[in-house]
C-alpha cells in the first residue's frame, strides 16, 4: 500500500517501507516533475521489515521498521523510524534505536535515482524517456545532487545529509554503531530546484517531536476560523470535519499561486494544480463556510480568461481555463503554454459561482471588479459555446491532441450510446445545457446588480427559450428520460446516466419530467445503495470499476441531492446523503475520495475503492458541505439580510448546530432541533440582525 503526503504543488508517493520503488508511479514530485524516481534504504545489505507505514497529516508520514534476523543481531531489538514532512522540499528524519543487550554495528546504504519525468509521462503507462543528468557529490558539504540542465530548463535534486556519508556515484553509505539502549538520529533534506530556485524544507531536525507540532500556521488559522458543526449525525460530523481539514491541505501555495487569493488544487496526488471546473465547483460547495475560496478562484481564473482564438490550446475569448501546468505540458501536448482550455462547462460555472458569491455576501465590489469577465463569459456561451447556432452548447476538440470529451466526465470513453457505441463530436451534453440555463439566469441577476436591466431582461428570455427547447429536444419518450447528449447528427445519446440527475440542480427540468427523473434515479440499476451511479448497470458500456461509466462520485451525488431538495423530493435526497456518507466511513480518515466503484451494496457489503482515486480531492471534500447546506435548506439573500432555512434531517437525527456560518460579512450561529418530526430553530449568534426565515415544505 502506498503512502502519499503533499503540500502545495509538491507530493511524495512511497511504499510502506518509505522507499520509492523503481518502475512505478512512486516519486518525489514538484510542479509537475518527478525529482526522485528511486530511493532505497537497506541496512547491512537487507531490507528492513515494515511495522507501520502511514500518513500522519496530509504533509507528514511515519514509517516504523525493524531489522530482519541478522547474524550477531537479535530479532526485534533494533527499530528504525523514518519521519517525514513535505513542503518546500522534503525533510526526513531517521531514528535508529538499539533495544538489545548487546552493541550493534550497522551500515546504512541509500540508493537514489532521478528521472525528471513530467507527470504526464509517468501517468501514460509508458516508461519515461531517459534524460541525461549529472551526478555530483561533495562529502564536505554532505550533499549529493542530480542535475538535468537543458534548453527547456534547469532541474536539480539536491540531497543534504546531517552527517558526512561516503558517496559512490548515486549511493551514500553511513556506518552506525549503537550501544545497548542507545539511539542515533540522521536527518536528510531533499531540495527540488527549478531554474536554480531552491525549495528548501521549512522544518529541521527534531521538529517531528516538537511541542508546537508540525502543523503550518496557515492550516491552524484556517481550521480555527472555519464554521464549526456539532451534530448527533456522526457520519456527517466526521465528513464535515475531514472536509475542512482537506480543503486546508488542497490550498495551492508558491510564487506562482495565490496572487489574488486562495486557490484549491483539484486533487492529490495527480491533480496538484489549478483546474477551472474543479476549483469553481469546490468553491460553490463550500461557499457558506469558506467564502475566501470563491474570491480566490474567481479572481485567479479571471487572470487567465481566454483572450483569443488559439486552437492549439482550445482557447477562445471569454472561455475559462481547464487546467494550468506551469511546465508548459498540458493535455494538448508540449505546447510551450501553461494553460489549457479544453473544458466546455467551466465558463458557465464561473458565472454561477459569481452570482452565488453575491447572494451570500452582497459584495457589489467583486461583481463590479469582475464585470468585464462576466460579460465576456456570457458572450462566450452564445458566440463560441454554441458552435452551430442551434441554441445548445457543444464541444469538439480543435486538434488531434487534447481531451476528446470536455464535460466533467472527461475520460475518452464516457459518452456512449445504450448499445455501447461511441458518440461523435460535436457533442451537446445534457447537463451542460442545464448549466447554460442556470448561468444565463445568474448573469441576469448580476446584470440587475450592475443596473444593466436591458441585458438582464434579454438573458432571462434566452434562458426561458432554452428551457423550453431543451425539454423538447433532449427528452426521450422511450425510455422516458433525458438523453445523455446529442451527437453530431443531433441524435439522442440514449444511455441512462447521472448527467440527468444534475439537471435537477440547474432547474431546467419541467415539473412533469422531474417526477420521472427522480423515480428513474432510484431504480436498482442506478442507485447502488452507496449512491447514484454515473451510468445505469443496464447499459452495454456499464463497468462498476470504470472512471465514469458506472462508478459513484460524491460531488455528482451532492449536486443531485441539492436538485432533489429544490424540487421538493426530500425523502429521496436524504437517501442519497445517508448512502454516500455511510460509504465515506469505510475509507481512510473517513474521507470521501474522488470516486469509488459502483458495485451493489447488497453484494459488496462495503464500498469498493477505485484504486487511482484522488484523496483528498477538492470537489469530493466539498460534497459533505453542499449536502449539509441542502439538508438544512439553507439559502441566503445577503442584500436583503435574509437567511432562509428549510431543514430536513434523517429520521434518527435530532440535532444540527452550526456556529459561524458566513453571510453578508458577518457570522451566524444556529441550532436545528427535531421535535416530533418538526424542526425548531434556535438562533444563537446574529450580530448582523439577519432575518431568519423558516420555510416548511
Image: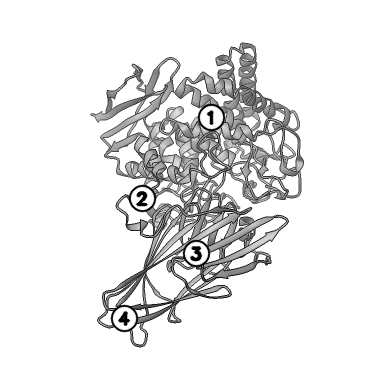
Check disc 3: other Cα within 10 Å, few if <14, some if 14-19, many if 20+.
many
Q: Which mark is residue 585?
A: 2
Front-lying residue, 166 or 536:
166
Q: Report the Cα–Cα distance between label 3 and label 2.
A: 41 Å
Against 108, is 501 above or below?
A: above
Mark 3 or 2 closer to N-term?
3
Against 130, is 231 above or below?
A: above
Mark 1 or 2 closer to N-term?
1
Quick check: marks 1 and 2 in contact, CB under 8 Å? no
What residue does disc 4 label?
Answer: 75
Front-lying residue, 190 or 322:
190
What residue does disc 3 label?
Answer: 160
Secondary structure under tag 4 reads loop
Please identify, in this view, whether the residue under mark 4 or under mark 1 is nearer the observer: 4
Q: Report the Cα–Cα distance between label 2 and label 4.
A: 37 Å
Secondary structure under tag 3 reads strand
Left or right of residue 330, residue 237 in this image: left
Q: Which mark is residue 353?
A: 1
Please identify, in this view, whether the residue under mark 1 or under mark 3 is nearer the observer: 3
Q: Residue furthest bottom?
A: 71
Front-lying residue, 218 or 638:
218
Amino acid at each position: 500500500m502506498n503512502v502519499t503526503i503533499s503540500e502545495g504543488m509538491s507530493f511524495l508517493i512511497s511504499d510502506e517501507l518509505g522507499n520509492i520503488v523503481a518502475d512505478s508511479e512512486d516519486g518525489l514530485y514538484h510542479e509537475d516533475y518527478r525529482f526522485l524516481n528511486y530511493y532505497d534504504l537497506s541496512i547491512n545489505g537487507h531490507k528492513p521489515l515494515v511495522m507501520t507505514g502511514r500518513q500522519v497529516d496530509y504533509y507528514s508520514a511515519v514509517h516504523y521498521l525493524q531489522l530482519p534476523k541478522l547474524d550477531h543481531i537479535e530479532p526485534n531489538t533494533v527499530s528504525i523510524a523514518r519521519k517525514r514532512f513535505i513542503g518546500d522540499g522534503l525533510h526526513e528524519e531517521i531514528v535508529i534505536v538499539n533495544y538489545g543487550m548487546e552493541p550493534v554495528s550497522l551500515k546504512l546504504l541509500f540508493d537514489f535515482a532521478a528521472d525528471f519525468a513530467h507527470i504526464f509521462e509517468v501517468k501514460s503507462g509508458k516508461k519515461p524517456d531517459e534524460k541525461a543528468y549529472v551526478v555530483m557529490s561533495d562529502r564536505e558539504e554532505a550533499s549529493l545532487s542530480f542535475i538535468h540542465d537543458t534548453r527547456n530548463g534547469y532541474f536539480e535534486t539536491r540531497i543534504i545529509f546531517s552527517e558526512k556519508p561516503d558517496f559512490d556515484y548515486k549511493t551514500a553509505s553511513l556506518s552506525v554503531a549503537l550501544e545497548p539502549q542507545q539511539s542515533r538520529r540522521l536527518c536528510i533534506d531533499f531540495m527540488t530546484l527549478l531554474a536554480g530556485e531552491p525549495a528548501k524544507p521549512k522544518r529541521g531536525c527534531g521538529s517531528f517531536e516538537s511541542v508546537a507540532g508540525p502543523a503550518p500556521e496557515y492550516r491552524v488559522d484556517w481550521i480555527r476560523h472555519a464554521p464549526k458543526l456539532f451534530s448527533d449525525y456522526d457520519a456527517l460530523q466526521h465528513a464535515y470535519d475531514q472536509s475542512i481539514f482537506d480543503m486546508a491541505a488542497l490550498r495551492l501555495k508558491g510564487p506562482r499561486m495565490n496572487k489574488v487569493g486562495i486557490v484549491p488544487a483539484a486533487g492529490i496526488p495527480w491533480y496538484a494544480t489549478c483546474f477551472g471546473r474543479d476549483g469553481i465547483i469546490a468553491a460553490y460547495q463550500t461557499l457558506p463556510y469558506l467564502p475566501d475560496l470563491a474570491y480566490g478562484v474567481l479572481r485567479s481564473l479571471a487572470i487567465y480568461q481566454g483572450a483569443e482564438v488559439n486552437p492549439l490550446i482550445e482557447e477562445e475569448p471569454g472561455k475559462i481555463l481547464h487546467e494550468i501546468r506551469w511546465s508548459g505540458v498540458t493535455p494538448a501536448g508540449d505546447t510551450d503554454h501553461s494553460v489549457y482550455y479544453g473544458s466546455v462547462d467551466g465558463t458557465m460555472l464561473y458565472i454561477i459561482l459569481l452570482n452565488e458569491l453575491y447572494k451570500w455576501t452582497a459584495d457589489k465590489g467583486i461583481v463590479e471588479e469582475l464585470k468585464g469577465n462576466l460579460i465576456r463569459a456570457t458572450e462566450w456561451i452564445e458566440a463560441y459555446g454554441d458552435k452551430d447556432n442551434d441554441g445548445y452548447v457543444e464541444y469538439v476538440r480543435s486538434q488531434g491532441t487534447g481531451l476528446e470529451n470536455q464535460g466533467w466526465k472527461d475520460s475518452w470513453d464516457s459518452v456512449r450510446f445504450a448499445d455501447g457505441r461511441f458518440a461523435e463530436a460535436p457533442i451537446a451534453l445534457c447537463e451542460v445545457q442545464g448549466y447554460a440555463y442556470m448561468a444565463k439566469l445568474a448573469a441576469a441577476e448580476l446584470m440587475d446588480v450592475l443596473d444593466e436591466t436591458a441585458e438582464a431582461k434579454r438573458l432571462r428570455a434566452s434562458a426561458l427559450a432554452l428551457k423550453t427547447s431543451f425539454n423538447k429536444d433532449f427528452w426521450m419518450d422511450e425510455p422516458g428520460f433525458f438523453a445523455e447528449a446529442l451527437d453530431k447528427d443531433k441524435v439522442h445519446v440514449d444511455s441512462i446516466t447521472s448527467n440527468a440527475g444534475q439537471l435537477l440542480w440547474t432547474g431546467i427540468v419541467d415539473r412533469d419530467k422531474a417526477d420521472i427523473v427522480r423515480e428513474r434515479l432510484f431504480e436498482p440499476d442506478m442507485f447502488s445503495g452507496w449512491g447514484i451511479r454515473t451510468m445505469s448497470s443496464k447499459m452495454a458500456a456499464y463497468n462498476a470499476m470504470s472512471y465514469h461509466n458506472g462508478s459513484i462520485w460524491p460531488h455528482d451525488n451532492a449536486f443531485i441531492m441539492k436538485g432533489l431538495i429544490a424540487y421538493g423530493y426530500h425523502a429521496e435526497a436524504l437517501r442519497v446523503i445517508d448512502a454516500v456518507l455511510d460509504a465515506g466511513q469505510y475509507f481512510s480518515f473517513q474521507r470521501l475520495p474522488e470516486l469509488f466503484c459502483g458495485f451493489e451494496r447488497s453484494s459488496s457489503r462495503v464500498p469498493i475503492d477505485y484504486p487511482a482515486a484522488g484523496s483528498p480531492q477538492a470537489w469530493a471534500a466539498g460534497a459533505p458541505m453542499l449536502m449539509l447546506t441542502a439538508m438544512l435548506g439553507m439559502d441566503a439573500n445577503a442584500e436583503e439580510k435574509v437567511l432562509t432555512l428549510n431543514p430536513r434531517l434523517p429520521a434518527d437525527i435530532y440535532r444540527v448546530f452550526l456556529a459561524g456560518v458566513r453571510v453578508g460579512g458577518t457570522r451566524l450561529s444556529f441550532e436545528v432541533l427535531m421535535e416530533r418530526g418538526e424542526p425548531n430553530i434556535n438562533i444563537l449568534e446574529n450580530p448582523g440582525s439577519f432575518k431568519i426565515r423558516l420555510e416548511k415544505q
